[in-house]
Amino acid sequence: MSNPRKKENYPLVEVRWYDSCSDSGWKHKVDSDLMTCWTAGYLVHRSARSTVVALNCGSQQSTKSHGDTMIIPTRCIQKIRRLR
């Protein structure tokens, strides 16, 4: 039986961020509010340019893998809250 792999140390977070939105219908009044979004997952990367949150993380031997990732422009992030 093989030894269990050490779990990668990625914090579980909730990210609140602004997204762009569009509408193709006719309007009499302009709605300039941005859409607020929330994304939860493992914080696997953060830089001045981008933040990456993954729903799934794994490792096999010396290779780390991430699945179901969301890349968010860091300048759009309003808050990152650690969940555990």
Image: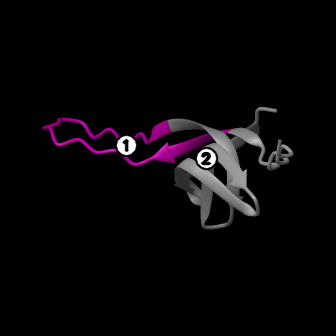
Characterize the local packing of mark 1: few (<14), some (14-19) or many (20 or more) Cα atoms within 10 angstroms. Answer: few
**Residue found farthest to the left:** 26
Q: Is 33 included in the stretch rendered in magenta?
A: yes
> Dot 1 lies on which element?
loop
The dot on residue 55 is none
The range drawn in magenta is: 14-36
Residue type at mark 2: give it. Answer: Ala
**Along the line of sight, which residue is nearer the eye, 52 or 74?**
52
**Quadrant housing residue 31:** top left
Question: What's the coloring here?
Answer: one colour
Q: Residue at x 60, y 62 (%)?
A: 50
Q: Left of 8 or right of it: where is 21?
A: left
Residue 37 is covered by the magenta coloring:
no
- Residue 46: give x, y in percent of width and height: 69, 60
Is disc 2 surrounded by few (<14), some (14 to 19) or many (20+) residues within 10 Å? many
Q: Badge 2 is on which residue?
A: 54
Q: Secondary structure at mark 2?
A: strand
Distance CA(mark 2)–CA(mark 1): 30 Å
Please tell me which of labels 2 and 1 falls first in the chain: 1
Left/right of residue 83 with respect to residue 51 in the rendered view: right
Q: Position of residue 10 (x, y in %)?
A: 77, 48
Q: Residue at x 76, y 63 (%)?
A: 62
Q: Which residue is mark 1?
A: 32
> Where the N terminus falls, by quadrant?
top right
**Camera-side mark, 2 or 1:** 2
Which image quadrant is residue 65 in?
bottom right
Amino acid carrying label 1: it is Ser
Query: In the rendered image of this protein, does residue 15 appear above or below residue 74?
Result: above
Percent coordinates x, y for residue 34 in the rendering? 43, 42
Coordinates of residue 27 in the picture (x, y in percent): 17, 36
